[in-house]
Amino acid sequence: MLTIALCVLLACAPAASDGPIPFSHALFDSILQARVDAAGRVDYAGLQAERARLDAYVDSLGRVSPRSAPRRFATRDHALAYWINAYNAFVLRGVIDAYPVSSVSDIGGLEGFFGAQTHLAGGEKLTLDGIEHGIIRPEYRDPRIHFAVNCGAASCPPLGPRAYTGDDLDAQLEAALRAFARNPQHVRLGADGRLHLSKILEWYGQDFADWFPADREPAPESPSVVDYLLPYLPGDAAEKVRGSPDLDIVFDEYDWSLNGQGAAP
């Protein structure tokens, strides 16, 4: 408990004389390493039984945010890392508060879990939808966040085993994008000859077109989500996509069952 208390103090301490103390995600990093497996599935039972570290981290989020204490976040990447981690931590907290459940849809329905249940970030009450659609997407305009925020469902991009950090954020987001594009659960050429994509890429397809990398060469005239993914696809899939401009695309149904380890309760 002493370690937890120290972590909270470090995350929430007032500015020191030589400058503000950066917000720390070390506590969340330790939680993810302990409770998330290589496939991105969560040990919710274990997390619920030993929830003190998650509660302490969520308390630190409640006290400090890039909005309430901007000087605690050295760069834009540090601020974005905060919001991604906050979203993921609030999802975990929301699940263990209700656990055992078989889906986040069991927690007040999807609209309730994402759009009504509030969480405290820097003293401000925010919903998960408010964080994702009111802050992360419009303020940071980086489609890679769709592979980093985790909604607690089996069809989500897997939850990573480490917290996001401002110092390494670009590399972490690139790794999340590459892992998503090479995971047949999310992107695959089907036996039917069609390209099967995650429903996420349909829901947020415009983000990938509107925020297409300006330095991508060659740049397509009207970029699509497939153009965005192309450099990250495995060689055989990339070759097939390049050689089939009229390739049929299917967006697979979304599986909202809980991304937990073991059988659903």
Image: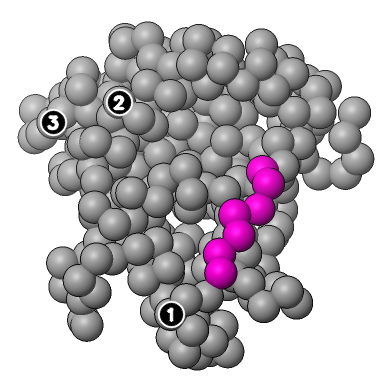
The percent position of residue 58, horizontal first and vertical second, equals 48, 22
Q: Report crowding for label 2: few under 14, some 14 to 19, many 20 or more residues within 10 A (C-alpha).
A: few
As drawn, 232 above or below 33: below
What residue does disc 1 label? 245
Which is nearer the N-term, disc 3 or disc 1?
A: 3
Question: Is residue 17 magenta-colored?
Answer: no
As drawn, 120 above or below 221: above
As drawn, 234 above or below 224: below
- Indicate the secondary structure of the residue bearing disc 2: helix
Query: In the image shown, does 16 or 190 lie closer to the viewer?
Result: 190
Identify the residue shown where x is 70% and y is 57%.
39
The percent position of residue 7, horizontal first and vertical second, equals 44, 30
Query: In the image shown, does 239 or 19 lie closer to the viewer?
Result: 239
Tell me the kind of residue under disc 3. Arg
What residue does disc 2 label? 134
Q: Report crowding for label 1: few under 14, some 14 to 19, many 20 or more residues within 10 A (C-alpha).
A: few
Identify the residue shown where x is 24% and y is 52%.
210
Name which quarter of the figure residue 46 lies in: top right
Quarter holding the C terminus is top right
Tell me the kind of residue under disc 2. Gly
The percent position of residue 103, horizontal first and vertical second, equals 75, 28
Q: Report crowding for label 3: few under 14, some 14 to 19, many 20 or more residues within 10 A (C-alpha).
A: some
- Indicate the secondary structure of the residue bearing disc 1: loop
Name which quarter of the figure residue 15 lies in: top left
- Identify the image's colour scheme: rainbow, by chain, secondary structure or one colour: one colour
Which is nearer the N-term, disc 3 or disc 2?
A: 3
Tell me where the magenta segment starts and ends, as one range.
Answer: 248-254
Q: Do we see residue 179 in this rendering?
A: no
Estimate the spatial distance between the alpha carbons at disc 3 and disc 1, rounded to whole Å: 48 Å
